[in-house]
């Protein structure tokens, strides 16, 4: 549960940084998008994937 | 309702159109880029909404399994689409004059270029609309994919030097300006070929870069000193 919540927070921050870029393109929003938003979103997806796989294993599906 | 939604989506486009004095064709509904930007904003807000709802449900005692669809949509599907729109907007947006002039140290260069009284080469290109948009980027990047990537990397380096203060005044171009960038537009044009200033015997030297275009066409910029 904690991992999923962490993933949600990371994804929300990542999407928010993307939103800043879409609203106004500056070098600062662009660098935040390139260097922060994308790693955060990638981390969120990985955490979510790992948690999903773990849950499936526990249920004996995998 | 539909009209209101379209008006909301096109708000940035309308603002840009108002700022530009070029008349729009009849039935103007914005550019593809402006629509992509509006759609990206809507999808980003939707992703945040989905994540907020999933978070709320988890706090109220739901298990991750109960909100798996919501999580899949909000954590994986929508962010990937939003990143795609971020790339399209980010890469095109960073080519604009406002992006180049975003650091205070460059405002005097931009002001000089946009000054109708300026006699600099950049101003001549700007006021005569020789280059319609993204004037800084057009002259300061090589064409082709590598030129785009190289210009973006240089830009990130410029931001680093600006933020850390590791640069010297007055601002100078790092490498000699390449004639290739001038040739992208001018080479082959009758005005260039028939100009008495470009006799046939000197054209190979211009093409090889042995003689710089700026030897005769300087100064490229005449900025007044900017304050940080």
Image (cartoon, rainbow, N blue to C red):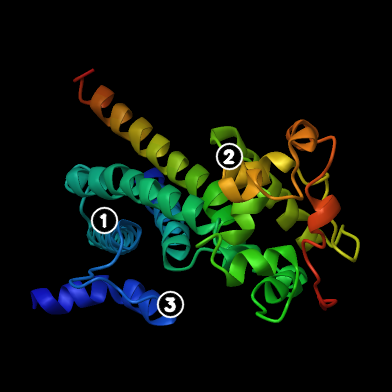
Q: Is residue A35 visible?
A: no
Q: Nearer the viewer, mark 2 or mark 1?
A: 2
Mark 1 chain: B
Mark 1 — residue? B58
Mark 2 chain: B
Left or right of B35? Residue B184 is right
Label 2 packing within 10 angstroms: few (<14), some (14-19), many (20+)? few
Residue B177 in percent (x, y) is at 78, 46
What residue is rendered at 85% in x and 76% in y? B225
Q: Which corner quadrant of the image does residue B105 belong to? A: bottom right
Give the number of the disc on residue B85: none
With respect to residue B5, does B183 lie above or below?
above
Q: Is residue B178 visible?
A: yes
Label 3 near label 1: C-beta < 8 Å? no
Left or right of B200? Residue B91 is left
Label 3 packing within 10 angstroms: few (<14), some (14-19), many (20+)? few
Residue A60 in percent (x, y) is at 20, 19
Q: Nearer the viewer, mark 3 or mark 2?
A: 2
With respect to residue B156, does B93 lie above or below?
below
Left or right of B160? Residue B146 is left
What residue is rendered at 55% in x and 59% in y? B131
Residue B81 in percent (x, y) is at 31, 46
Give the number of the disc on residue B20: 3
Q: Where is the C terminus of chain B found, in terms of image quarters?
A: bottom right
What residue is rendered at 55% in x and 56% in y? B95
Mark 3 chain: B
Label 2 near label 3: C-beta < 8 Å? no
Mark 2 — residue? B188
SS class, disc 2: loop
């Amino acid at each position: 549960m904690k991992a999923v919540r962490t993933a949600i927070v990371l994804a929300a921050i990542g999407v928010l940084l993307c939103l800043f870029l879409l609203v106004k393109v500056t070098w600062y929003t662009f660098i935040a998008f390139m260097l922060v938003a994308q790693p955060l979103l990638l981390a969120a997806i990985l955490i979510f994937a790992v948690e999903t796989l773990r849950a499936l294993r526990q249920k004996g599906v995998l | 309702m539909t009209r209101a939604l379209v008006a909301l989506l096109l708000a940035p486009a309308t603002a840009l159109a108002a700022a530009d004095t070029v008349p729009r064709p009849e039935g103007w509904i914005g550019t593809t880029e402006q629509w992509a930007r509006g759609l990206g904003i809507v999808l980003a807000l939707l992703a945040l909404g989905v994540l907020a709802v999933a978070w709320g449900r988890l706090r109220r005692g739901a298990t991750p399994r109960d909100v798996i669809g919501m999580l899949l949509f909000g954590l994986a599907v929508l962010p990937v689409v939003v990143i795609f729109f971020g790339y399209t907007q980010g890469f095109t947006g960073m080519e604009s004059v406002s992006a180049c002039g975003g650091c205070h140290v460059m405002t005097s260069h931009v002001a000089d270029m946009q000054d109708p009284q300026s006699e600099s080469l950049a101003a001549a290109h700007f006021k005569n609309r020789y280059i319609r948009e993204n004037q800084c980027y057009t002259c300061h990047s090589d064409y082709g994919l590598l030129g785009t990537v190289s210009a973006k990397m240089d830009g990130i380096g410029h931001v680093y030097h600006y933020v850390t203060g590791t640069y010297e005044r007055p601002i100078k171009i790092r490498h000699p300006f390449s004639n290739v960038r001038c040739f992208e537009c001018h080479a082959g044009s009758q005005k260039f070929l028939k100009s008495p200033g470009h006799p046939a015997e000197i054209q190979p030297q211009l093409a090889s870069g042995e003689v710089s275009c700026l030897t005769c066409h300087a100064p490229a910029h005449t900025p007044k000193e900017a304050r940080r």
